[in-house]
Amino acid sequence: PQWNKCIDSQELKQLKIAMLAKDTSMEIRTEICRRVKNLAQEETSNDAENRKAIIDSGIVSEVLRAMEGEGLASEELQAEACAVLGNLAVDSNGRDYAADRGGIERIAAAAQRHPKSKRVLEQARGALSNILDGRGIDSILELAIERLSADVIRKKRGISAVVAVMSAYLQTENVQEQACRALCNLAYDNDDNRVSVREAGGI
């Protein structure tokens, strides 16, 4: 029955091979991202194990790679890839994986490249919310605004997260105001954070 279904490791292997192939079209890469998204969101008794299997297979690394280069121009691929990251980030394993391997930065890039795409922005916001431990956008901004453990925030990619939030909520005035305050406070009297703000695209 569906409730006890485990992910087929062979399917994950084939998906990864297809993503690695140089001649795989953008349309096929998008379909692979959509398939991985669906696998990651299936509700079964083994859902946590299935998400871990997806990560361990290496396919998510290829999804992240596909978000770069020419893939950045594809609205559909970016939306599906953001959805993959969001679905995997419902638990700590997926959150850590996405944050540690540049997922936040890629989500920010997707939002910056497609600022008028409702679908990309919706998926980017959902993924960010999950990666940021489900605390939502306001919490990460409030944390940064209060300058609580600024060095810790930097090390946890919080600066990249704030910049990503700004990209995903470009037309939301109060979010932009809070994000600017957050970056100012994080950079105040902290040279390392100033460099991180600049490198993250916060200027």
Image: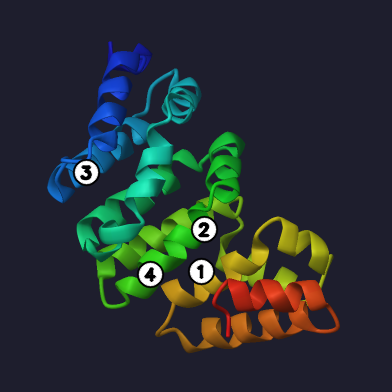
Label 4 element class: helix
**Contact flag, marks 4 and 1 (Cβ < 8 Å):** yes
Look at the image and tell me whether residue 72 can be seen: yes
- In the rendered image, residue 116, in percent from the top left (x then y), is placed at 27, 77
Give 115 or 14, whichever is nearer the viewer. Answer: 14
Above or below, 179 against 37 in this view is: below
Instruction: Specify the quadrant that holds the C terminus.
Output: bottom right
Dot placed on the residue nearer the N-terminal end, 2 or 1: 2
Q: CA distance from mark 4 to mark 3?
A: 19 Å
Residue sitting at 30 percent across and 63 percent down? Answer: 120
**Total tally of numbered discs in the picture:** 4
Q: CA distance from mark 1 to mark 3?
A: 24 Å
Instruction: Assess whether mark 1 and mark 2 are in contact (beta carbons under 8 angstroms).
Output: yes
At 67% from the left and 80% from the top, the residue drawn is 183
Q: Is residue 9 left or right of residue 180?
A: left
Q: Amino acid at mark 4?
A: Ala
Name the foreground residue: 70 vs 53: 70
The disc, 4 or 3, on the residue closer to the chain's N-terminal end is 3
Residue 145 visible in the current orientation: no
Q: Verify CB contact (< 8 Å) between mark 4 and mark 3.
A: no
Q: Position of residue 67 (x, y in %)?
A: 34, 54
Can you tell which mark lies on residue 29? 3
**CA separation in Å, label 3 and label 2:** 20 Å
Residue identified by numbered label 1: 164
Question: Which residue is identified by label 4?
Answer: 111
